[in-house]
Image: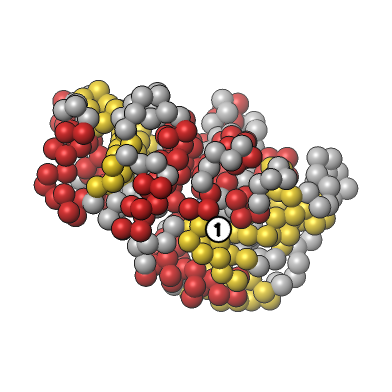
Amino acid sequence: MKVPVFTELQKLEFKEKPKPEIREAEVLMKVEYCGICGSDVHGYLNGIMVPLGTVMGHECSGVVAEIGANVKNFTPGDRVVAKPIPECGECYWCRKGQFSLCNKAFERAIGISPAHDGAYAEHVRIEYPDQMLFKLPPNVSFQQGALVEPLATSLHGVRVSSFKPGDNVVVIGAGMIGLGTIQFLKIGGAGQVIVLEVSEKKARLARDLGADVVLDPTVEGEGLRERIFGLTGGVGADIVYECTGVPFGFQNAMFFAKSGGQVMVVGINDKDVAINPFMLVLWEIDLKGVLGYYDEFNHVIRFLEQGKINSDLFISGIVPLADIEEKGFRRLIASKDEVKILVKP
Ligand SMILES: [Zn+2]
Ligand SMILES: [Zn+2]
């Protein structure tokens, strides 16, 4: 099979690789769809988190094609979605159920290192099927299945926040993760959902998913904080979800929160960003980072099964694997309007 290998910065090179061989406890999965993640694009642009030589792709749905002799819980033909980061089940964090903090999670993950090829391929080897594979209900499509991983990230951000029904919230950024966050906040009974987004197309999607107010920070300018406080009875948001990874979001999030409120840092940014700790203290802001997901795959799959997630809105396009670089990565880099692009091997 031909797979796109990340051979140098801003370059994917198609190379011939044999179909993966599986061992006794492993599963071979035929990939139906794989989403292009923002982290893949960051890696492609500047090498962050993704070493050269990697075959990326970690948001995939597919069919069990082959099973090893010791595999008990899956049979060929099963429709599945893969959780790309398998927990060890034994470390301090795993015992507490905080699987994304597992000691071994990232060394075993698929699609983020050359050691474990990802799902931008016809087939992907699943080394820990019991930790990694989740069956899809009959009424959940493969395209929806490919959205489970990023939706799990959004849901995790909401679940580990202090969110309660009725809370007024600000969501910064209406990309995949921000839109997912909006969706789960609505399902969870948010009071007012105020969204900050510069792209008109994404602003429309946010509204379609139930955002009460969408503000463009470039239009509001200096008056943005006042506007948000005006919308929240002069108090500020109970929780602000920073879902962009753009310095503006992290730097300003605490200014939109109420005193005693919470700022959830969901978006990833690895650059230094200056904030004034005095404000954090003065307003008793609870600043909290979130990573990946614990057990959210099950919840997301159930929400999809119950038809609670407006999944069509998240998919900006579907491209053949052969066009992944031009119509996937480069399109995501060039346009602010795209949400999730799925690759079809
Ligand atoms: Zn991802
Ligand atoms: Zn562990």
Q: Does the closest atom of ligand 1 sit within 8 Å of the Cβ of label 1?
A: yes
* Residue 133 can be seen, yes or no: no
Structural crowding at the residue carrying mark 1, measured as other residues with C-alpha within 10 Å and reported as few (<14), some (14–19) or many (≥20): many
The residue beneath circle 1 is: 35
Residue that appears at 71% across and 48% down: 80
Q: Is residue 71 left or right of residue 320?
A: right
| Residue 23 versus residue 317 in the image, above or below | above
5, 165: nearer the viewer: 165
Q: Locate residue 97, reporting x and y percent.
A: 57, 28
Question: Which residue is at 56% across, 25% downward?
Answer: 96
Query: Which quarter of the figure is the C terminus placed in?
Result: bottom right
User: Residue 81: image x %, image y %?
Assistant: 66, 48
Name the element at disc 1.
strand
Chosen colour scheme: secondary structure
Q: Residue furthest left?
A: 222
Q: Position of residue 309 (x, y in %)?
A: 53, 42
284 lies above or below 37? above
Q: Is 194 drawn above or below residue 236 in the view shown?
A: below
Residue 300 percent location from the top left of the image: 57, 39
